[in-house]
Image (cartoon, grey):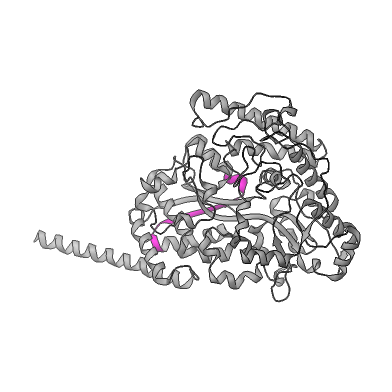
Amino acid sequence: MFKKVATAVAVLSISASSINAWADMNAAKKWVNDEFQPSVLSKDEQMKEMEWFINAAKPFKGMEINVLSETIPTHEYESNVLTKAFEEITGIKVNHQLLGEGEVVQAVQTQMQTKRNLYDAYVNDSDLIGTHSRLQLAVNLTDWMKGTGKDVTNPNLDIKDFIGISFTTGPDGDIYQLPDQQFANLYWFRKDWFDRPDLQKKFKEIYGYDLGVPVNWSAYEDIAEFFSVHVKNIDGTRVYGHMDYGKRAPDLGWRMTDAWLSMAGAGSKGLPNGRPIDEWGIRMEEGSCNPQGASVSRGGGANGPAAVYAIRKWDEWLRKYAPPGAASYDFYQSLPALSQGNVAQQIFWYTAFTASMVAPKSDGNNTVDDAGNPLWRMAPSPKGPYWEEGQKLGYQDAGSWTILKSTPEDRAKAAWLYAQFVTSKTVDVKKSHVGLTFIRDSSVRHASFTERAPKLGGLVEFYRSPDRVMWSPTGVNVPDYPKLAQIWWQQIGDVNSGAFTPQEAMDRLASEMDNVMRRMEAADKAAKVYGGCGPRLNDEKDPSEWLGKPGGPKAKLANEKPKGQTVNYDDLIKRWKSS
């Protein structure tokens, strides 16, 4: 009798299990049909991938995990839509919280310092790759995927398809983060205004060359002056030739560490980041993992002529050519302000805002026509006078999934499943259409983006072009991003307020970075806090021993404003398409 009852219970158990699995597959089918289209995978391939997630998630069914990212449209879609899909398909509930970028960095730093599990995973900028690879407090994903996390690593993940995987790879060659969203800072301009014959004629009369996409900062400055000073009004609207922000807040620091100095030409040649001097001005020799200093007196470039020039131009353009009040804007206020339709160009514009810039005219967006076609375009960033071939040309944000070692293993595995789900080939094309923050080469080349490209102002063409590699995040020269990044904004704010000249501010910034790195060096020597890859500062020398020397910071140019150069936008797009 007992045997029969046990057999019956087993049969019922198997039947219940089968019903639950079938219910999960039904949920997957619903999401694949109703939400996850288009995709680079066929529906059958999508269902096969979803079946893998269902099976891999069984040990964690009913678990509730917490993840954190900054607030941009891509993450809003993940938080509002993809968490629901993931729970219905896998049975794992995800609380995907959204906060400002500074709060995300602070949470990561707090968890690393306290070893308390605040969140089970973060979408943490790859700017911290130098930090994570040195401190070894983040899970080494290369080891994880082969070892502890092998049972929860999607065989269809296809790491090589991620266009920013080099940004999340440490100097040891291992991957520490998985890209989730990616966007670049490019040049933005009102093509409808640039195409007007009357404005073209007037610009050439004043400046002696064609109004077009600026190739160098000289042309950008001329165009800024042209619209703000000479044109002033278009169709009854007061217009300006430049937009930026200057509010004394942490994102003012990121405005500069996000490769502003490299656009001017302050760093060394080398991709994805300059060596030996990166865009922060920190020196680290090729083949080494030990930063040697930021000051020119130590062979760095943070207070060198090119860096000082970059800060001077930021401050000058903001004062002379931007709309009133721009100096008090922060990052989140300045970029959407373009939709008001009174700015001709912006040299430092993030493609993450493409989604809002293609919103319909009925939503108050004055930079699209009645049919929803953009009146604006994006193009490569202009180059400063210190820039030379072989350098990076701008910044590319790569918000990337990061799991800290302080997270319990079962929670880390469940979070890793969610991270792979929201970046999977099943999901990614649709997510890319929502947020326009491409992470997969296969997604940007999907036919649906060929069809949509004309309404995206050059975004698709840029990400399909080989030029995209010239935009990159903070690299491995920066030994501890949270500690060093917080130094920047106060110094830059002192320039905007008039308290210090650009040279004084950058001298102080370089000195403070060296002081912080000196403390890191002591900690690393005493206890290998940075795994032996902490700073090893060069002795100070007279700056003349470094300036203009091979591998050293660049000497001051006699002429920092060469003749302006522009290109025709349509010719540029043809070149991108042909490549």
Q: Left or right: where does residue 328 sit relative to residue 446?
A: right
The residue drawn where x is 56% and y is 42% is 128
Work out whether 211 lies above or below 478. Answer: below
The spot of residue 208 in percent (x, y) is 88, 59
Query: Can residue 236 be seen at all in this image of the molecule?
Result: no
Instruction: Tell me the quarter of the picture where residue 241 sits.
Output: bottom right
Specify start and end residues of the magenta stretch as a single range: 89-104
- Any magenta on residue 409? no
The spot of residue 553 in percent (x, y) is 70, 36
Q: Quadrant of the N terminus?
A: bottom left
Instruction: Tell me the quarter of the picture where residue 351 sits.
Output: bottom right
Q: Left or right: where does residue 121 sit relative to residue 354?
A: left
| Closer to the camera in the image, 76 or 546 | 546
Q: Left or right: where does residue 272 sit relative to residue 151?
A: right
The residue drawn where x is 39% and y is 71% is 44
| Closer to the camera in the image, 408 or 451 | 451
The spot of residue 41 in percent (x, y) is 44, 68
Work out whether 556 lies above or below 411. Answer: above
The residue drawn where x is 55% and y is 64% is 444
- Which residue of the protein is positioned furthest toward the bottom in this rendering? 371
